[in-house]
Image (spheres, coloured by chain):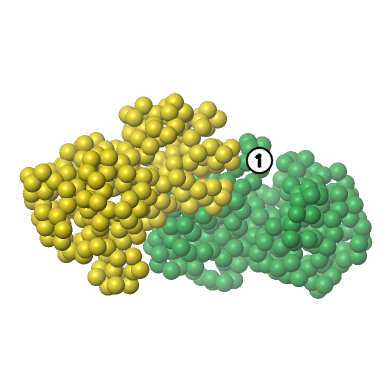
Chain colours: A green, B yellow
Amino acid sequence: MRRYRGYIFDMDGVLYRGSEPVPGAAETIERLKKRGRRVVFVSNNSTLSREDYAEKIQEMGLPITEEELIPATYATARHVRERYPGERVYVVGALGLIKELLRAGVRVTQHPSKASVLVTGSDPEISYQKLSYATSLLLRGCPWVSTNADKLYPSERGILPGTGAVVGALQYITGREPLIIGKPSKHIMEQALRVLGVPREECLMVGDIIESDVLAGRSVGVDTALVLTGVTRREDIEASEVKPDYVIESIAELEV
Amino acid sequence: MRRYRGYIFDMDGVLYRGSEPVPGAAETIERLKKRGRRVVFVSNNSTLSREDYAEKIQEMGLPITEEELIPATYATARHVRERYPGERVYVVGALGLIKELLRAGVRVTQHPSKASVLVTGSDPEISYQKLSYATSLLLRGCPWVSTNADKLYPSERGILPGTGAVVGALQYITGREPLIIGKPSKHIMEQALRVLGVPREECLMVGDIIESDVLAGRSVGVDTALVLTGVTRREDIEASEVKPDYVIESIAELEV
């Protein structure tokens, strides 16, 4: 395995599982930092703000600062601020997404008639009214940005609907499609590369899901490594048409 | 236009618009009944029970009895009772749908782990928890029956999400597809034909939407007439690949 100057890490399944850190993860990150490698951490989490997420990560003892973290909430807020400056935004999403939008200086409104951009994420308080409001924006032709479109995610309470529940509902009834910020989209990856400040030929994306992490790496032309501490097994890789550049048992095996 | 022995009418856009009856609708229905024609009324409404719906129709002065009405709520309840006798059902849907299921003797449960069939309809109280519960049934492989899959519907408060919001969300995240009872599915039409008790060659379907009513008529091999009192204009028919057997200005022009 080549050494790289910049590393982009997926989080759940790579650094931790549930609330348990992967053995050796903290040590590997510290070693990388000591050797002067640049590191950044991306996640499709669409319900936690960057600050809330950093707190959760630090509680697990992982040596990661808020500035090194790019959850989809944060990446979406940055995209909306840059692409739609001054416009009012209607949100179907969790408090963490609203916090990031506000922190980025985006004008968030509860009145759909005043909004000109729709932003969606996973919403634990999804309602018929919110879907109706979002529909009215989409039928008016307003741009639609989504943190991600993940279908399902495993949790301590079983497999739960992801942001895909909101995206699928609105897509089906309006025929519109969102611009997706999270993996496997290139948008969150471009933001990660900007934070790294390293040419993409010298960057490695490390993740645990082929359709999300490996494709995200491909979308911006960086090399990819798949770890087996998450949802993917060796036989899944054999069955897949998309192959990562490297397969390693865990982040602890990363040569730094 | 041929005379028929049995008539299946769509309701909204044919008999009334919003809460206003179409001029001549009541008289046409009375004339048909006087001449001994059989009539039945089908609707994709997934929030009102048959009884609630009959009340609404009768308030508009339309001479239609509860027994002549087949809303999707009622048709769905009948289908579930016949196809899944004794099984417990989890519902994402409005009170009107639950009422019909209970009235049909179907066992409805709030506990997804006890249910073996999922029934969906438009749900004004859709929630993340309901979607999660429905997802758990679908991931277990339980059968899924939906009143309909209509995308949008016009209302006094503007264009609102139909049952398609629930169907689209669950379909997107689970990859499953429901059995659809309402138009353009043949299921509601077969129930209508059973109520009519007339051979299908002698029946006419009258509606205002090509993709819903005309296709529904086709699905069971009955002749179709399109009225122009609803959402369809003459130029829409010219642009459509599917053509009804007859086009008439309104139900009042029906030769009986």
The image shows a total of numbered marks equal to: 1
Q: Look at the image and tell me whether residue B153 can be seen.
A: no
Position of residue B64 relative to residue A43, above or below, is above
* Position of residue B226 measured from the top left corner of the image (x, y, whole percent): 23, 61
In the rendered image, the vertical position of residue A54 relative to residue B50, given as above or below: below
Picture quarter containing residue A193? Answer: bottom right
Q: Quadrant of residue A156?
A: top right
Q: Is residue B146 left or right of residue A70?
A: left
- Where residue A215 sits: x, y (%)? 71, 62
Query: Residue at horizontal 28%, vertical 47%?
Result: B43
* Position of residue A187 in the picture relative to residue A22 (left or right): left
Q: Is residue A231 visible?
A: yes
Q: Is residue B210 left or right of residue B88?
A: left
Q: Position of residue A48 (x, y in %)?
A: 63, 50
Classify 10 Å Cα crowding around label 1: few (below 14), some (14-19), many (20 and above). Answer: few
| Residue in view at x 83 percent, y 63 percent | A245
Q: Nearer the viewer, residue A146 or B29?
A: B29
| Residue toward you, A81 or A205 | A205
Q: Which residue is found at the position 32% from the left and 38% from the top? A: B74
Relative placement, left or right, of A153 versus A175 is right
| Subunit bearing disc 1 | A
For the N terminus of chain B, the image quarter is bottom left
Residue B119 in the image: above or below residue A143 = above
Secondary structure category for the residue under label 1: strand
**In the image, what residue occupies the spot 84% across and 70% down?**
A202
Residue type indicated by callout 1:
Ser
Q: Which residue is mark 1?
A: A155
- Quadrant in which the C terminus of chain B is drawn: bottom left
